[in-house]
Amino acid sequence: MKVGVVIFPGSNCDKDAVYAFKNIYGCETVELFHKDHDLQGCDLIFLPGGFSFGDYLRSGAIARFSPIMQNVIEFANKGGKVFGVCNGFQILCESHLLPGALLHNDHQKFNCKNVYIKAQTNHSLITSKIDLNKALKIPVAHGEGKFYCDDATLKTLTDNDQILFRYCDENGNITPESNPNGSLQNIAGICNEKRNVFGMMPHPERAVDADIYNTDGRMLFESLLDRVLQS
């Protein structure tokens, strides 16, 4: 299993991702520079969080045009597995690999705290092993995390079972109060119709080590790696 973590100017969660894949799960892990065109034969491409290109224009809007994204888009369109977290999710939406957009948080403040999310389906690589009744404690760190799409797109996401996670409280209740940014219907993560591209705002790679007293993110990695190895 070989994982490529793409590094853009302003990425700041790439080391967390490399640590999770390499040190926790023993995957061969390489860092891919945004100006490159070589995905180095990776089985999975991970787009990390951060502030690519300073989040000028819109978050992810400039990174979408980085040279390596041409290869990532081609890879995804051929069925390759791509996972984007936070800024990575924003880049996937800007690249039209995922529908919708990430807007400024309703309260116009930067969120940096632990939140709770609940998987909405087991029909995806990153949620296949997750108990749908369990609330996962996962940190967020974003100023533009409000997921939005039009009614037709929302219907498609719902009908095709593409909504992966919703924000909830610690008991698993999906409420307006548990929504940290105003996301439409508390949506915290989605996948594409082909189910090979995944995006979410919370950071599971920051919740895999017992030394920081949170390992809830491991469930996503274990689901993902187990299914990728089987495919």
Image (cartoon, grey):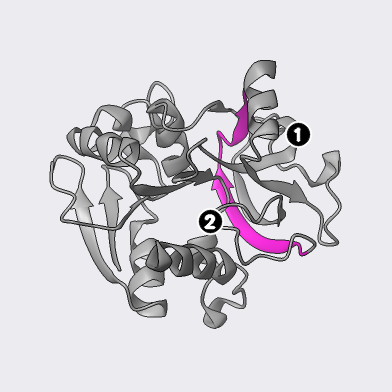
The residues colored magenta run 134-149
Whether 148 is among the magenta residues is: yes
Residue 142 drawn at (x, y percent): 55, 42
Residue positioned 83% across, 47% down in the render: 174
Dot in front, 1 or 2: 1
Pointer 2 local density, CA inside 10 Å: few below 14, some 14–19, many at least 20: many
Question: As drawn, is 163 to the left or to the right of 92?
Answer: right
User: Given the image, on which type of amino acid does mark 2 rest?
Assistant: His
Residue 110 drawn at (x, y percent): 59, 40
Residue positioned 30% across, 39% down in the render: 78
SS category of the residue bearing label 2 = loop
Tell me the quarter of the image containing the C terminus. Answer: bottom left
Residue hosting label 2? 203
Tell me the quarter of the image containing the N terminus. Answer: bottom left
Is residue 130 positioned above or below 23 on the image?
above
Residue 81 drawn at (x, y percent): 37, 50
Question: As drawn, is 213 to the left or to the right of 195?
Answer: right
Can you tell which quarter of the image residue 96 is in? top left
How far apart in space, not on screen, are marks 1 and 2 (Cα)? 19 Å
Q: Is there any visible trace of residue 31 in the rendered image?
A: yes
State whether the magenta stretch is mostly helix, strand or loop.
Answer: strand
Q: Is there any visible trace of residue 150 in the rendered image?
A: no
Can you tell which quarter of the image residue 23 is in? bottom left
Q: Which residue is nearer to you in this view: 220 or 14?
A: 220
Mark with earlier residue (1, 2): 1
